[in-house]
Image (cartoon, helix red, strand yellow):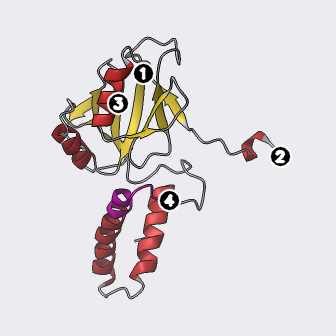
């Protein structure tokens, strides 16, 4: 068995904070789940995430506020609105362009382009990035999973919209719409070519 055959899943990211109680209040306010851990370690897991965040005294020598982490969301507008409603100071949505960043959503709503950012009380940066279709090779072939009800519901809505366009192109109802939806959702997640 070679190294490429060993499953290694990212479990935890350690972030540096100066005040553990203040950080607990902030991450708890985000609605992240407080996990049971050994003494001296505080661990929160964002809704729908397979990876958690840890902080605590003596976990890292990095300077508080020096971390920059990414959170992916399937609908950046909804995620930003929820954070604003929770009282989090967050940037306006912006997108990447050839000459840097531009205010507003990516005009084509492409995956990986639309972003917003916020900071915890220490200045650790969290960059939200809208991802609905993965780049090829980002997931193992054939593996598909939805980590939350909202993630699955968003995927179903995108499949429904794409299927409506499919039926318009063919000019007839598709009796096997469940199969079409399933193929669309699997391909979208794995970065494979989407059905038309």
Query: Which residue is more in the foreground, 193 or 42?
Result: 42
Q: Callout 2: helix, strand or loop?
A: loop
Does the magenta-highlighted stretch encompass residue 146? yes
Residue located at (29% from left, 20% from top): 121
User: What whole-number distance in Å separates the C-alpha atoms at marks 2 and 1?
Assistant: 35 Å
Q: Is residue 106 above or below residue 173?
A: above
Mark 1: give few (<14), some (14-19) or many (20+) Cα within 10 Å. Answer: some
Q: Callout 4: helix, strand or loop?
A: loop
Q: Which mark is residue 126?
A: 3
Does the magenta-highlighted stretch encompass residue 129? no
Disc 2 marks which residue? 1
Q: Earlier in the sequence, mark 3 or mark 1?
A: 1
- Residue 30: x and y, percent? 29, 37
Mark 3: give few (<14), some (14-19) or many (20+) Cα within 10 Å. Answer: some
Residue located at (50% from left, 59% from top): 145
Picture quarter with the C terminus: bottom left
Disc 4 marks which residue? 145
Disc 1 marks which residue? 67
Residue 130 seen by the camera: yes
Query: Which residue is more in the foreground, 5 or 108?
Result: 5
Q: Is residue 36 left or right of residue 2?
A: left
Q: Earlier in the sequence, mark 2 or mark 4?
A: 2
- Residue 158: x and y, percent? 32, 64
Q: Is residue 58 above or below residue 14?
A: above
Q: Callout 3: helix, strand or loop?
A: strand
User: What whole-number distance in Å separates the C-alpha atoms at marks 1 and 4?
Assistant: 28 Å
Mark 2: give few (<14), some (14-19) or many (20+) Cα within 10 Å. Answer: few
Q: How many marks?
A: 4
Q: Earlier in the sequence, mark 1 or mark 4?
A: 1
User: What whole-number distance in Å separates the C-alpha atoms at marks 3 and 4?
Assistant: 24 Å
- Residue 75: x and y, percent? 29, 50
| Residues drawn in magenta | 145-154
């Amino acid at each position: 068995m070679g190294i490429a055959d060993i499953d290694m899943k990212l479990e935890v990211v350690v972030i540096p904070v100066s005040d553990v109680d203040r950080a607990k209040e902030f991450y708890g306010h985000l609605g992240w789940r407080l996990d049971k851990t050994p003494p001296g370690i505080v661990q929160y897991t964002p809704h729908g995430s397979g990876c958690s965040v840890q902080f605590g005294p003596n976990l890292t020598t990095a300077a508080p506020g020096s971390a920059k982490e990414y959170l992916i969301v399937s609908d950046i507008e909804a995620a930003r609105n929820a954070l604003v409603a929770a009282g989090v100071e967050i940037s306006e949505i912006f997108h990447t362009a050839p000459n840097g960043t531009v205010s507003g959503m990516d005009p084509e709503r492409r995956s990986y382009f639309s972003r917003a950012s916020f900071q915890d009380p220490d200045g650790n940066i969290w960059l939200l990035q809208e991802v609905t279709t993965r780049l090829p090779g980002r997931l193992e072939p054939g593996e598909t999973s939805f980590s939350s009800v909202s993630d699955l519901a968003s995927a179903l809505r995108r499949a429904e919209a794409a299927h409506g366009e499919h039926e318009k192109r063919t000019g007839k109802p598709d009796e096997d719409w469940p199969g079409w939806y399933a193929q669309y959702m699997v391909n979208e997640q794995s970065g494979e070519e989407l059905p038309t």
